[in-house]
Every structure is written in structure tokens, then in C-alpha cells.
Image (tube, rainbow, N blue to C red):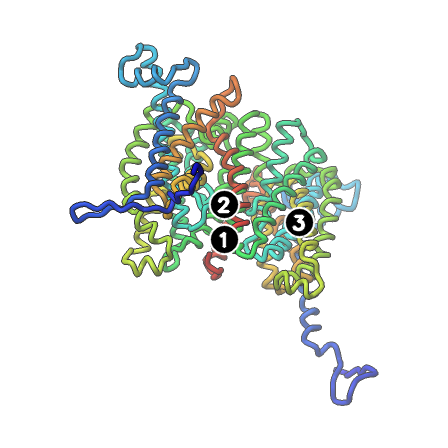
Amino acid sequence: MIGRRRTGLGHRTVAVRAAGYSLRLRPRALAAGAAIAAVVLLATVVAIGSGEFPMSPVEVLRTLAGHGAPSEAFIVEQVRLPRAVTAVLAGGALGLAGAVFQSVVRNPLGSPDVLGFTGGAAAGALATIVLAGGGSLALPIGAVAGGVTTGVVIYALAWRRGVTGYRLVLVGIGVAAVLTGLNGYLLSRARIVDAQRAVLWLTGSLDGRGWGEALPLLGAMLLVAPLLLYGGRDVAMMEMGDELACALGIPVQRRRLLVLAGAVVLTSCAAAATGPVAFVALTGPQLARRLTGAPGPNLLASLGTGSALLVTADLAAQRVVPGHQLPAGVVTGVLGGGYLVWLLTTERKAGRL
Amino acid sequence: MSHTTSPTSRPGVTTDRRDLPGTRLALARTVGLLAAIVVLAAVAVLSIGLGARPLSLPEVWHGLVERTSTTYPVVHELRLPRTLLGLLAGMALGLAGGVMQALTRNPLADPGLLGINSGASAAVASAILFLGVRTFPGYVWFALLGAAAVSVLVYVVGGGRGATPARLALAGAGLNAALYSYISAIMLLDTASLDRMRFWTLGSLASARTGTVLRLAPFIAVGVVVALALARPLNALALGDDSAKALGAHPARIRAAAVVAVTLLCGAATAACGPIVFVGLMVPHVVRTLSGPDLRWALPYCAVLAPALLLGADVLGRVLGRPGELEVGIVTCALGGPFFVHFVRRRHLAPA
């Protein structure tokens, strides 16, 4: 009989047992993860190969391996590779942070850009541009300082014998609204030249990002991401409810503080490198969840989808309007906005909103 | 107290209406409303009087009334249009907030927080950039369109049974983020737009001209009438659709009319002043402590106290921002943010 049969791969769990240890694997999640990683690599290679001097993927790989022509090597190593690496790292940071937030807040809309954390990074950076001229060192420091300070303030305001996702959401929304006003005020007080620079930065762009941005971000990711991935199991269990998680032996408030702190640091560092790119932290984890079909926050997969999203958005932004380079944040903003509307209506219909 | 007896009264039973608690309450509320109107008038006078050249009370009066006085041009060309704009916009935003909070049964509903004002702004920004529209009569229609689109979306999203305050607020915040990034993208494409928009998106009464105010008035007037007329139907809706239907109301029609009212009020106010946040949140809360949840009293109180708040914020902005001014949108943000956070912390809202 020739026909299709639904194998229910998404729900299957395979247990591998050997020498007294057992490991549970989800085939679909593994396959999805591998596919996401492949997409990221492919997109990165294509991104490196595109631009004013197009290079084929083979040439790109050859140049990366060290066998390319000197001019090509310069372009790849000094201009395009750092840009692509920044995109991968920033997208991964945003995806990871977004997954953590959405899990803690228990709402697919609870991403750091909506809850005011990204707005805090933006405020910090805007303050350095408007008040201090915003040199290339001051700007990222301002962004990180702003983001972390805002994170502390929101956490402190939401704390009332502990922090629940619910209060975090509401306080975050309030703080986000105030920060929008503050950012608007800073923008209006700047000179027009500074204002233009500020708005360009605020949209989120990878233009001109080099090793100076990529390496610090790499450092931050290497420090923080393992912490978050380690805490991922506890985050998954906290999704079942605070009381249940506590009964399972998880120190709920401490874990929550740890993962939120890590997520805020990642968001701020990503914003420091590229500016606050909108909606990667919102759509990346959702996409990862739908691809892997696995329960829980899907931290590693979100890292991958975040990277893939930002790299492809940057690629698209360079190509979509011929002769004019748009910032990547415009593409993510428009697509993310459309996705948000779709998400709202489907969640509403499913009764989850 | 004399006992007046009606023809159907029985001996020993008083029918003096002054004794009935409902009447005393209505009297108290009427007095309160009159007091609120007095407060509004005082703030309006303050708004006319304060500025780069402060005017005393007699000067304000002469400036309003006597054509030949020296303060007449200042008052009639600058201060009065600004005060009237603040009055109209404040009334619009306060009523819209009251209607939205009643409609979504959500104490956190505010047209600014739920993205309606951002929708109007995004439509205006698009008009400025793509169609070169420069003046209020041009972009008021776009603002109405933008406000309508987001109002419908918010109503669709927020009208479900599972829509808790946080979920609706989160949906609104997401929409705000999306629309704000769209507005930033527009500001990037054109420096001239950037220069206009970065002041306009703050929300300010500085662009008040008599012409603007006169053109704004019809939209706001219709919106106010619809909103006040919805007071009783929205009261019926407060206990749920089924109870409302049992009371003879038509929930779908009421919701549609509420969306129309909110669109008119927010769209027109945003077109004239730019997006102003938190007025529609703070005022209905304060009003509810004075008037109770009955919308037949709460909405008129909102209509009177919200302009008082907006004009007060404007006056504060002018005082704090000397010699320039601090835009009213910033002042309401600075006031409303802590209010919102304080409210969220104090009240035990049902968990998600």
C-alpha cells in the first residue's frame, strides 16, 4: 500500500541506555536543532559572500580557510566576517534571552523589548549620545549600564515577597512606557545630527559592525549562555507553577533571579553591539518551539533561530531596496509586527490570550 | 424636616425624597461634579495666565474680553487656543480611557498603553512621509484610520473570556513596540520627517492654533456625545454578556459603538497633539474613588477631571521647562508611570 502515515515524531522520546546511564532524546527536536544550525551556517556563508563584491559560497569557504586572494581575504576578514559573527552572536543572545523571558512570564508576548529592558538599554545609549557626544566606547557602555539598571529597577519594583511573572509583566509595561517618554525627551533635546544618529542606532543595525563589537559580545555569550543553558532545566520545571517547582526542590526565587539577570545581561550586550533590534527575542523562541515540538523553553533551539533570524534579516535588509542599505531592525520590525498581529489573533482564537 | 405626603402614602411612612440614601448620594455626586468643574476652570485660568509672560487674573480677564487690551493678542492667539486644545484633548483621552476600561473590564486599559494612540501616530507618520501631508486637517483622517485599526484589533484580542488584564496589556505593549519601530523606520527615511516627528511623537500642546481647535471640536464633540450616551449600556455590560442580554442590551452593538467613540476621541486627539499616554489610565481610577463604578457618573467626572489633569500637566511642563517647555506627553509619562507601578503593586489583580 502506498500512502503516508503520520508517525507522530514530535511526541516520540527515545531512551538510550548504556552502562547504567540513560539518556532521553527527542528525534524531532534533534533534527530541528541540526536543521537550524545548518540554516545559520548557510545564511552566514551567503551573507559573507554578498555585497558590493559578490563571492560564491565556495570562494567564501576557501577564503575562510586561508586560501583566498589577499583582497578577498581582507574584505572577508575585516568587514564581512565580523559583521556576520556579530549578527549570529547578537541574534543568539536575543533568542536565548527571549526564550528565558517568555518562559518566566509564561506568555509568548513577554519578550525583553516589550517589557522595557531593551528600552532601558536604548535610554542609556541615547543619554551618552545626547549628553556626551556618544563616542564608540561610550555608547556600548551606556547601553549595558542602561539595560542592567532598568533590569534591576523592574525587578525591585516587581518584588513583593518574591517576583511572579505576572507582576513582572505589568511593571515592565509601565516602565517601558515611561522609558518611551524618556527616550523621546532625549531625542528631542539632541541636535539634529545627533538625533539622526540616535534614531539610526535605535532601529538596530549591523552596518559597520566589526571585531570591536563582535569580540566583547562573544565574551559575554561565553560567560552567560552556559549559565542560562544550565538553568534551562529548572526553568522548564518552573513553568509548571511555583509551588510545584518548589516541591521538586528548585529554589524558585533564586533561579528566577539568576536566569533573569543572565537574560538582561545578554539583551543589554546585544543592544550595545547592534542597537535594540526589535522582535528577534519575540519570534525566535516561538519559531524554535514550533520547529522542535518539544515542551519547555527550548533554550538552545531559540539561540539558533535567533541567530538565523538576524543573519537573514540583515541579508534581506541589504538587498530589499536596491541601491539603499536598510538597517536590519527595519526588516525585523516589519516582519515581527506582522507576526505579532498573527500571534495575537491565533492565541486569542485558541483561548490562550 | 417637613414630611410631604404623596396621594398614595400610608400614615407613618415617610416619602420625603430627601431622606432616601440614593438621593443624598446623587446630591453629593452633583456637588462633587460642580466642584470638579470649578477646579477645571481654575486650572484653565492658570493655563491662560502662565507662560513666558505671566498674566495676573485681571489681565487674563481683560485679555479674554476686551479687544483693545494689550494682553488680548497674547491670550487669543496663543494661550486660549492652547488651553482649549488641552481641554478638548483631555476630555477625549479621559473619556476614551473610561470607556475602554469599562469595555474591556480591565483596570489597566489606557488608549496609550494599548497602542491606539501609536496606531494613530503611525498613520500620521505615514501620511507625512508618503503623502507629504503637513497640516492637521490632512492628517486627522489618517489618525482616525490608524486609531480605528488598532481599536478593532484590541477589541478582538481583548474581548475573550480568558483575557486577563496582563494579557491585554501585553498585547497592547507588543503593538506599541511594533508601531514604534515602524515610526522609527519612517523617521530614518527622511531627515525633515525626523525633525518634525521627534517633537510630535512626544505629545505636546504647542501646535495649538485657533484653526486646529475649531477643526478638532466637531470630532471630539461627536465622540463625547457617543461616549456619554454609552454610559448606561456599558453599565449593563459590566456583569457579562449574558446578564447584559437579559437586561435587554445588545453587547455587539454596544461594543461597536464603543469602538467608534474611542476611535473618534483618540484619533482626533492624537492628530492634534501627538500621542499622550497615561491620561486615560489615571483619570478613571481617581474618578472611581469619587463617583463609584456607575458610569453615568464616572464618565462625566472623567470628562471634567481629565482636562484638568492634562492642563495641569501642561502648566507644570511650562513651569519646569523654563525658558522653553517640557512637552505635556513627557509630564504625563513621568506622572503616570509611577502611578501605574504603584497601582500594580498595591492591587491584587487576578494571576495569569
Q: Which mark is residue A69?
A: none
Q: Residues within 10 Å of mark 3 (few under 14, many from 20)?
A: many
Q: Which chain is indicated by disc 3? A: B
Q: Residues within 10 Å of mark 1 (few under 14, many from 20)?
A: many
* Residue at which label 3 appears: B259
* Residue at which label 1 appears: B166
| Residue B182: percent from left, percent from top | 54, 34
Q: CA distance from mark 1 to mark 3?
A: 21 Å
Q: Nearer the viewer's eye, disc 2 or disc 3?
A: 3
Q: Nearer the viewer, residue A37 or B59?
A: A37
Q: Which chain is indicated by disc 1? A: B
Q: Nearer the viewer, residue B126 or B192?
A: B126
Q: Is residue B232 above or below residue A280?
A: below
Q: Are marks 2 and 1 on the same chain?
A: no
Q: Is residue B183 visible?
A: yes
Q: Are marks 2 and 1 in contact (CB under 8 Å)?
A: no
Q: Which chain is indicated by disc 2? A: A
The amino acid on which the numbered mark 3 sits, given as a three-letter code, is Val
Residue pictured at 45% horizontal, 44% vertical: A116
Residue pictured at 50% horizontal, 36% vertical: A336
